[in-house]
Amino acid sequence: MERLLLVFLLTVFINLINTLVRSSRLAGVRTGHLATAISLFGVVYLAASFANTLQAPLLASTVERIIDDASSQSLLVEPGVSVISAWPYQDALSGLNGKLRLVILGATSGTILGLLLIPSFITSFSNAIRAFGRTGSVFKVIPLILLSLFRPGSGIVKFRLSSVATLKKILLTRMTVPSYFLYWNLISYSLWTANVLSGLYAGALYPEFRSTAVLMASIVGNASIVLNVMMVDPVLAKVTDAVARGEKDELELKQIIFYLAISNLLGTLFSQVIFEPVAQGLQLLTRLIS
């Protein structure tokens, strides 16, 4: 249970960072240092990448343990029946399904937290960019960030909420950019959220080739990345450049960042729907090539 809780918290953190990533563009525009903003966010993203390297093996080892225990128990209780068909294994599958859905809930929680922290992040990240401009060193900026955490309201880190007036403008002003990219983002994020978890569940459904099933999940993950790179990022980049040149109002970039975060949130909810169908599809592909 402690391991599952750790996986849940890591998932929250990973999705928190993924929700905030686009906000770094606005911080870059405001400070006039867009390239610096993108580069500095890479430092933040390293933390999420490290969390991801911890999450995957922890989750995989948990699934492996469940499969091995259920297989052993099934052989003892119903020795003449297929392991997968035996009731102990089916019970284990049901429990595993619930655990993996809990991890997806962690993704939803992290996205909600990221959505709430967007205003604070933009302000704090803008301050960090300016501090980097003064010091010229990431290693000098990090202590300033840590110090300001113990002095709320001072230093680099600032906690703030969007004003009601700003939210009204974001919600009531019509975007000039076609909204199709938001739907692509929803699909992309739901596939990205579900891909590894569906692969692990597919491995449990077909334990003889579970390693193959897990590796097959990379197809889903890569498809989500392609969708994001082809259909979402170019729109955000185009508007960011236009705002940086003064051709568009900053409000439009705020709208896109806000609606993309909402789209991420809906994507994590939709991943609950596609989690099992994707796992069944990966199981079928695994059977075809094995």
Image: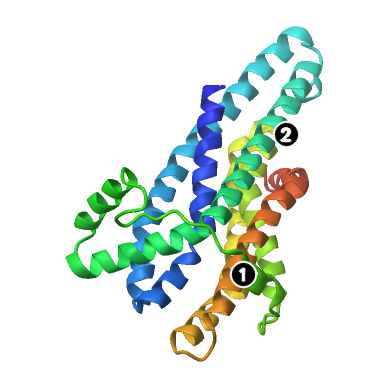
Horizontal side of residue 249 vs 139, given as left or right: right
Q: Is residue 6 above or below residue 196?
A: above
Of residues 243 and 97, the one drawn nearer to the viewer in this rendering:
243
At label 1, the amino acid type is Ala
How far apart, in angstroms, are the residues tagged by discs 2 and 1?
Answer: 51 Å
Q: Residues within 10 Å of mark 2 (few under 14, many from 20)?
A: many
Quadrant of the rendering where the C terminus is positioned: top right
Question: Residue at image x 56%, y 71%?
Answer: 229
Using the image, tell me which numbered label, if any, was put on residue 205.
Answer: 2
Of residues 51 and 135, the one drawn nearer to the viewer in this rendering:
135
Residue 39 visible in the displayed image: yes
Q: Position of residue 132 (x, y in %)?
A: 25, 65
At label 2, the amino acid type is Leu
Label 2: element kind: helix
Horizontal side of residue 226 vs 159, given as left or right: right
Q: Which residue ends up furthest to the bottom in the rendered image?
A: 247
Horizontal side of residue 206 vs 33, given as left or right: right
Question: Residue at image x 66%, y 35%?
Answer: 102
Q: Residues within 10 Å of mark 1 (few under 14, many from 20)?
A: few
Q: Is residue 213 above or below residue 157?
A: above
Q: Position of residue 245 (x, y in %)?
A: 44, 89
Using the image, tell me which numbered label, if any, was put on residue 165.
Answer: 1
Q: Quadrant of residue 84?
A: top right
Using the image, tell me which numbered label, if any, was put on residue 96.
Answer: none
Label 1: element kind: helix
Horizontal side of residue 83 vs 17, given as left or right: right
Q: Is residue 273 above or below residue 88?
A: below
Q: Is residue 123 above or below residue 61?
A: below
